[in-house]
């Protein structure tokens, strides 16, 4: 019996140990007034076990907190829980434990005080819903921090970057605000990063930078009004990235910038407008990049390509209103660039002084392969008004007619709109006709819009105005008034002077009879 008793005790102790080791995560509270389990965050971390939640209350807490356990550190909100870096040496929070979650803090730096808001040197870390502003280094800095999620943070007004990823793969950077810093988001030596729905504006240098980083996706970001560029892919091996549906407008230099051996990137459906130099700038041995369906307008140069760049394709882009060049490859060592099937804002294509002087779109340099362009050979129909002159006075029933002239295809429809109301379909005919009853309008200047289509392209919209005058005795458009040019609308057969004299005489006679 005794051996069995020993065995029973051993099994029972083992089960108890396992039960204690696998117990549910506990919540540890931190309050500045001592009413919680601890009055500072570091002590709470020191006494926590993996999986615990450290619930930090309202108030201001010291920085230089090292989080080396796998815990969740949760503040009461960015307007309630603060971490003060005034007495800190290097950071607000330094995360070295895997599977850490940090949320709900306001970690604000001070001018001249070095340090990060949050430094991450671990894997599977989540940092979200924090305000991390005014630091002399980065707001969030990572090193070898794979599978990190950084989302919904305000990382503005920092000297270096809002968010800086280094050597960190498979991370998500989503819905952060990174304004008024050196660079909004900087990714270096990191692969398979999703950068989505961030606002990167008014930074000294750039909005979003990929440096030596590949297979990343940059999507739906606003990267505008930055000191240099909106989005940059650069400095060797920033390859196979997908950049799409971003707003890269109003930057001092370029909207999207590829520099130095960036290859095989797909850049599509971005807006690159009103940048100081280029909409898209490709420089130094960048090859086989594809630029499709981007809007490139209002820049000094729409596209500029320089120094040994080859195999790059530009198709289905809108390129217009770029005053110096739509596409300039004059500094690209004579390499021809395929820029066919773009829309130049005109049916007549781009302008080249010798090769295509009849084009009235943006100018292109030599070595641009531009034919065919979108709309080439397609001439829109035309419409005209013949029945009336613009600004002509009309009254009553008005009969309008004019020409609808096809070019390459027959007319499919003709529509008219009055005072910007709903379009009305007219019978397709040449001449077209339209009867309009103006009698519901006493007087006014009425706007008409007219357009025809061959089913593929529309005519230029014809806009004209007619002056309605339906006052009694009003003229115009065949309305009354008689043939006598001297008729002023008074009593027929009597001059004005005679009428006035008769009225005065009658009043004098009445007055005398009363007297």
Image (cartoon, grey):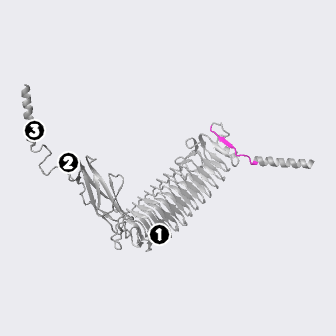
Tell me whether the residue at label 2 lies in contact with that at label 3, contact meaning CB atoms closer than 8 angstroms: no
> At numbered mark 3, what does the secondary structure look like: helix, strand or loop?
helix
Which image quarter: residue 361?
bottom left
Q: Is residue 274 left or right of residue 444?
A: right
- Which segment is the magenta one? 21-32
Is residue 277 visible from the viewing direction of this image? no
Expressed as whole percent of the image width and height from the top left, the position of residue 389 reads 23, 57
Which label number is shown at residue 474? 2
Compared with 367, 403 (above or below) is above
Expressed as whole percent of the image width and height from the top left, the position of residue 445 reads 27, 50
Is residue 154 visible from the viewing direction of this image? yes
Quadrant of the drawing holding the C terminus: top left
Q: Which residue lies under the disc numbered 3?
A: 500
What separation in Å lies between label 2 and label 3 (alpha carbons)? 24 Å
For disc 1, the neighbor class at 10 Å (few under 14, some 14 to 19, many from 20) is: some
What separation in Å lies between label 1 and label 3 (alpha carbons)? 86 Å
Q: Is residue 47 magenta?
A: no
Q: Is residue 131 left or right of residue 121?
A: left
Q: Which residue lies under the disc numbered 1?
A: 313
Q: Is residue 205 left or right of residue 168?
A: left
């Amino acid at each position: 019996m005794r051996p069995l008793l020993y065995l029973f005790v051993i099994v029972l102790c083992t089960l108890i140990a396992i039960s204690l080791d696998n117990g549910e995560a506990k919540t540890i509270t931190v309050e500045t007034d001592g009413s919680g389990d601890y009055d500072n965050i570091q002590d709470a971390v020191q006494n926590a076990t993996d999986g615990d939640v450290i619930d930090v209350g309202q108030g201001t807490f010291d920085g230089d907190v090292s989080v080396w356990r796998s815990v969740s550190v949760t503040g009461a909100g960015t307007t309630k829980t603060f971490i003060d870096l005034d007495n800190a040496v290097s950071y607000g929070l330094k995360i070295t434990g895997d599977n850490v979650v940090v949320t709900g803090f306001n970690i604000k730096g001070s001018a001249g005080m070095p340090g990060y808001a949050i430094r991450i040197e671990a894997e599977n870390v989540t940092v979200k819903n924090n305000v991390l502003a005014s630091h002399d280094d980065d707001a969030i800095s990572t090193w070898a921090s794979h599978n990190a999620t950084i989302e919904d943070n305000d990382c503005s007004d920092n000297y270096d970057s809002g968010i800086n990823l280094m050597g960190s793969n498979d991370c998500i950077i989503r819905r952060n605000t990174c304004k008024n810093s050196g660079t909004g988001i900087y990714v270096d030596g990191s692969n398979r990063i999703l950068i989505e729905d961030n606002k990167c504006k008014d930074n000294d240098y750039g909005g979003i930078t990929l440096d030596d980083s590949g297979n990343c996706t940059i999507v739906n970001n606003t990267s505008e009004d930055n000191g240099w560029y909106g989005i940059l892919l650069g400095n060797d091996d920033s390859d196979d990235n997908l950049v799409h549906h971003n707003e890269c407008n109003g930057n001092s230099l370029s909207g999207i910038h590829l520099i130095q051996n960036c290859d095989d990137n797909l850049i599509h459906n971005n807006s690159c407008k009103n940048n100081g130099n280029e909409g898209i700038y490709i420089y130094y041995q960048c090859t086989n990049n594809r630029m499709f369906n981007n809007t490139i307008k209002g820049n000094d140069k729409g596209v500029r390509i320089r120094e040994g760049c080859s195999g790059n394709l530009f198709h289905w882009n809108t390129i217009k209103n770029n005053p110096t060049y739509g596409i300039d490859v004059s500094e690209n060592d004579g390499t021809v660039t395929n820029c066919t099937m773009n829309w130049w804002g005109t049916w007549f294509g781009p302008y080249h002084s010798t090769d295509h002087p009849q084009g009235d779109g943006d100018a292109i340099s030599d070595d641009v392969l531009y034919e065919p362009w979108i709309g080439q050979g397609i001439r829109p129909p035309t419409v005209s008004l013949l029945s009336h002159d613009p600004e002509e006075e009309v009254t009553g029933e008005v009969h309008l007619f004019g020409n609808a002239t096809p070019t390459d295809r027959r007319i499919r429809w003709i529509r008219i709109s009055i005072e910007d109301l709903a379009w009305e379909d007219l019978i397709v005919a040449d001449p077209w006709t339209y009867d309009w009853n103006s009698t519901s309008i006493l007087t006014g200047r009425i706007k008409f819009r007219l357009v025809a289509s061959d089913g593929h392209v529309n005519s230029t919209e014809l806009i004209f105005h007619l002056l309605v005058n339906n006052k009694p005795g009003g003229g115009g458009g065949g309305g009354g008034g008689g043939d006598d040019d001297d008729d002023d609308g008074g009593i027929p057969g009597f001059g004005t002077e005679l009428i006035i004299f008769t009225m005065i005489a009658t009043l004098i006679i009445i007055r005398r009879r009363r007297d």
